Amino acid sequence: MSSSAIARSSIESEWTLPSRGRVGMFTLIAAESAIFTIFVVAYIFYIGKSVSGPMPKGVLELPIFITVCLLSSSLTIHLAVRALRSAKVGAFGLWWFVTMTLGAIFLAGTGREWHRFIFEDGLTISTNLFGTTYYSLVGLHAFHVTVGLMAIALVLILTLLGKVKPEHSERLDVFSMYWHFVDVVWVVVFTVVYVIGR
Amino acid sequence: MASETIALNEFGDRGRSISERLHDWVITVDHKRLGILYILFSLVFLVIGGIEATIMRIQLIVPHNHFVSPQVFNRMFTMHGTTMIFFVAMPILFGFGTYLIPLMIGARDMAFPRLNALSFWLTAFGGLLLYFSFIGGNGLYGAGNAPDVGWFAYAPLTSRAFSPGHSTDFWTLALLVSGIGSMGTAVNFIATILCMRCPGMTLGKMPLLAWMNLVVGGMVILVVSPLTAAQIMLLLDRYLGGHFFDTQAGGSAVLWMHFFWIFGHPEVYVLIIPCFAFASEIIPVFSRKPIFGYPVMVAATIAIGFVSMSVWAHHMFTVGMSSYGNTFFTITTMIVGIPTGIKIFNWIGTMWGGKIQFKAPMLFCIAFLFQFLIAGLTGIMLSAAPFNWQLSASYFVVAHFHYVIVGGILFTIFGAFYYWFPKMSGRMYNETLAKWHFWLFVIGFHLTFDFMHIPGILGMPRRIYTYEPGRGWEIWNLIVTVGVFFQIAAVLVFVVNLLLSLWKGEPAGNDPWDAWTLEWSTTSPPPDYNFAAIPVVGSRRPLWDLKHPEDPDWKYE
């Protein structure tokens, strides 16, 4: 502004704004939270409303191991990004690989649970309300894990090709926010499905 | 500031073939082009939605009319509502936001230009998907094209048993796809407004349009997502045999109502707040005064955003809720009137003592003030549960929300169109034709929607395809339909004005209105990069400071 040249340069030098990546990711997480909220509300609303079996009490087992895997992947992704920030690309690759493995174990565990439900307990999405709400809520979460794993795998490939540099740590930090979010959602899903709903 | 531009952009279009230019529009990530695409897309759908409304009104002009069959009538009201909300009002407002936000905050583009393009094309694809139902909706069943479940698609009408064929699938997929597009736009709005402001533009110095679109972005994030979730559930029910809304298996039809209206009511505010933003930009410029009560305007907008999230079940008084539920939703609905009233007070305060110029944009905004006030008053009437039991789902409700959507939203959109048309096209519109448009539309609007209240009070339900003579409804329906033809004439004048002005309007110059926000500091139309040098601002009216260095605003703010 022509107000004065001094004011202009002092405004410009002090001018800092939030990172758009972070703000964008926070906003996306808010939107995803709203979607999950609706599914969680539907799940809670329909607890005990199924008119035929199988019922949650008969089939659900606490998935402790895969929960531990998924939650600890939040720690490993944090360690990975921290390693990259201090330019240790090797350590980054290792932690990143561990993160992917833990996420994949979680997904495989969910898959095993679904396999057991479908082929042993005869519970599908159309069997009863429990099936409908269970598969849609857990499935929505598993879908988010899958999307995250695809992104992680892509970054891992780029790391192996030597394209990931310390200057990318900011972007991966933004991505790790998504992964933490997926973990937090699992805590909610676990509580609602396996603790309250059983 | 950035009045100088670099000549390299000076219409590189010359000598290029039409297909090359079209290709540029398809692959563009420029917020200005995407904004214009949004607006043109919406105008096309406005005409389509208008034709559907006209078909309904012709059918209802006299009792026992046989202009269309009941089945076609059902499709018309479903498509009219869905089109007007999702493919006219939302995209046109997103279009103005996409076009104006970066220019008004002194940025060169949105925060995520490619996401911006993705959002537009998702919305456009959603619109095409909805209208493809006319061709593909029959499925293998010969079960009727185009969705006919009403725009809020209550269960169990949407279940396989009652909606065979694919028409309802097209409806739900169109809303799912365009909903994802809306979420992308909202992410972009928020990130742009928070992270891309030019130096000196603190939150307290942002134009109100940016503030209000920030609130709208937050609301879209929180209310369109539930709709998306509900559409996923409906798809699971229809395709995989889920039981969410299947009452025979213990599911609940009322749950769909809650999920839909958690979206549906705040959606009204998602649509009206950008229109408040237009009014807040246009009224000060044509009153030659700064906006009255800027901080209060911001606070009122945020208050509306919050309160409007907790009013949804006022759409469901007749469904049957506990007396506590009824009381809660009556009170919250009435509370929304307070911040809205504050806004109307502030706009009048802005005009008070100003040198008002009655140009077309200002005329539309003044009409908006009166009409929106009346719409708000009938809203307060309907928010009282006992009154609502009497008049819910009658033409009184139809008249009320068209007063909001046409009298409030569409009027300000027309105002915004005339106000920013010189900036977008570089040419002035024809003021005489614009006044014809205004007066014809005012007459048509009031003939249609003032008189529509009366058959509602006399007991005429909405969504009936015909009615018996002798109930005292005939004369009112006749007047209502006559008003439609005035509105059609007005829109024709609007389209003629648009084309004529594009073709040979007078050059507009950078700043035809002697306005104060940053978009008027660059050329019309702005160059690709918006500003040659990123501006630095010291007040809410940077161009005032520039034009009046002896008495700049920043001394007082």
Image (spheres, grey):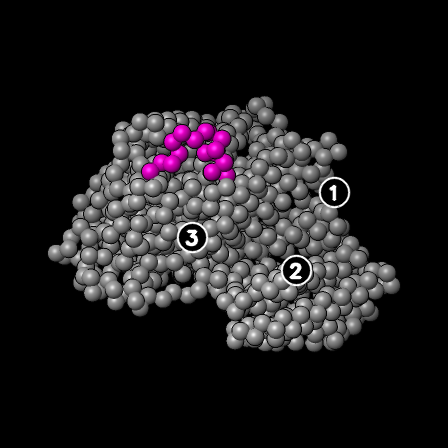
Chain of the residue that carries numbered disc 2 in the rendered image: A
- Give the image quarter of residue B211: bottom left
Residue name at image x 36 percent, y 54 percent: B107
In the rendered view, tell whether residue B436 sits above or below residue A94: above
Q: Which mark is residue B161?
A: 1
Callout 2, which amino acid? Answer: Met
Callout 3, which amino acid? Answer: Met
Q: Is residue B453 visible?
A: no
Question: Which mark's residue is nearer the viewer, 1 or 3?
Answer: 3
> In the picture, which quadrant includes the C terminus of chain A?
bottom right
- The residue that label 3 is drawn on is B110
Q: Secondary structure at mark 3?
A: loop
In the rendered view, tell whether residue A59 sits above or below residue B224: below
- Do the numbered discs 2 and 3 sit on residues whose CB atoms are within 8 Å? no
Residue name at image x 73 percent, y 43 percent: B160
Chain of the residue that carries numbered disc 3 in the rendered image: B
Callout 1, which amino acid? Answer: Ala
Question: Between marks 1 and 3, how big is the CA–CA gap?
Answer: 46 Å
Question: Between marks 2 and 1, how big is the CA–CA gap?
Answer: 38 Å
Chain of the residue that carries numbered disc 1 in the rendered image: B
Pick the residue in front: B488 or B413. Answer: B413
Question: Which mark's residue is nearer the viewer, 2 or 1?
Answer: 2
Discs 2 and 3 share one subunit: no
Picture coordinates of residue B383, whole percent (x, y): 47, 53
Q: How many marks?
A: 3
Which residue lies most toward the top here?
B66
Q: Start and end of the magenta stretch?
A: B10-26
Picture coordinates of residue A153, whole percent (x, y): 66, 62
Pick the residue in front: B142 or A25. Answer: A25
Picture coordinates of residue B514, whole percent (x, y): 22, 44
